């Protein structure tokens, strides 16, 4: 669902100190932006930024980048996120990730991504073979993906896609909040939990 247009989004984006405007110039050199050589994790489709902010606060030894392509989403996240030295956000379409990063990402978070339910749109799913191929260009040494979704069909599709691409399943839950996994929750997730929906979770690596 597309968020309603924010009339002041341009002002919010312009005045944000942790929005990276020209991210392509840091390709292969994001350590220069952060001023350290800590590992870098990205969240593709960051929503309002709750998950990203909590992860950055819980792990000051890790650098985090929130990614979204819509200005309305970025502006709303900016209003929720407080500046931290290990956190920034980036306007970027996921299909263009290899233009912004080069073998420097340690982990990708995919939280409640668009399921693109119609078969003809399956290539747009962030766990499709075409996107997994893009991720290979930005991962550093080990490839790691953590995914959460309320959509069972997307979850099943993703498990098949991961295993076909030689990923190993490290963790898996068919009802995340009944199992003992401790991690921040997103705004969407809070609503799903209230409605009693199961949250599917998988952590894969190769």
Image: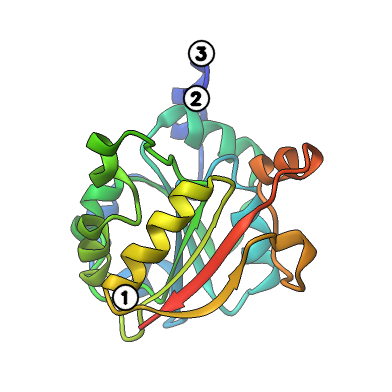
Looking at the image, do the residues carrying marks 3 and 2 touch, with CB atoms under 8 Å apart?
Answer: no
| CA distance for labels 3 and 2 | 18 Å
**Apparent side of residue 23 relative to residue 184 in the rendered image (left or right):** left
**Apparent side of residue 149 relative to residue 82 in the rendered image (left or right):** left
The residue that mark 3 highlights is: 7
Q: What residue do we see at 52% from left, 29% from top? A: 12
| CA distance for labels 3 and 1 | 36 Å
Q: What residue do we see at 30% from left, 49% from top? A: 94
Q: Position of residue 204 (x, y in %)?
A: 45, 75
Q: What residue do we see at 36% from left, 38% from top? A: 69
**Apparent side of residue 152 relative to residue 165 in the rendered image (left or right):** right
The residue that mark 1 highlights is: 104
Q: Residue 16 got which mark?
A: none
- Number of other residues with Cα within 10 Å of mark 1, as a class: few under 14, some 14 to 19, many 20 or more: many
Q: Secondary structure at mark 3?
A: loop
| CA distance for labels 2 and 1 | 32 Å
Q: Residue 1 got which mark?
A: 2
Q: Does residue 66 appear anywhere in the picture?
A: no
Nearest to N terminus: mark 2 or mark 1: 2
Q: Is residue 33 above or below residue 13?
A: below
Q: Is residue 12 above or below residue 78?
A: above
Q: What residue do we see at 22% from left, 62% from top? A: 134
Q: Is residue 83 above or below residue 13?
A: below
Q: Is residue 64 above or below residue 194?
A: below
Q: Secondary structure at mark 2?
A: loop
- Number of other residues with Cα within 10 Å of mark 3, as a class: few under 14, some 14 to 19, many 20 or more: few
Q: Quadrant of the C terminus?
A: bottom left
């Amino acid at each position: 669902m597309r968020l309603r247009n924010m009339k002041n989004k341009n002002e919010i984006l312009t005045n944000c100190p942790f929005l990276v405007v020209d991210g392509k110039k840091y390709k292969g050199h994001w350590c220069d932006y952060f001023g350290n050589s800590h590992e870098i994790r990205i969240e593709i489709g960051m929503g309002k930024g709750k998950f990203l902010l909590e992860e950055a606060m819980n792990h000051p030894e890790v650098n985090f980048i929130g990614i979204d392509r819509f200005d309305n989403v970025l502006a709303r996240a900016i209003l929720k996120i407080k500046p931290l030295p290990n956190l920034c956000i980036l306007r970027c379409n996921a299909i263009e990730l290899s233009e912004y990063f080069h073998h420097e990402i340690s982990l990708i978070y995919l939280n409640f991504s668009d399921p693109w339910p119609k078969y003809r749109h399956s290539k747009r799913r962030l766990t499709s073979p075409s996107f997994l191929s893009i991720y290979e260009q930005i991962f550093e040494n080990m490839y790691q993906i953590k995914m959460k979704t309320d959509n069972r069909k997307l979850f099943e599709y993703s498990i098949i896609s991961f295993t076909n691409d030689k990923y190993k399943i490290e963790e898996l839950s068919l009802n995340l909040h009944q199992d003992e996994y401790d991690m921040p929750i997103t705004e969407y997730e809070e609503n799903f939990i209230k409605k009693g929906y199961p949250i599917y979770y998988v952590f894969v690596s190769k």
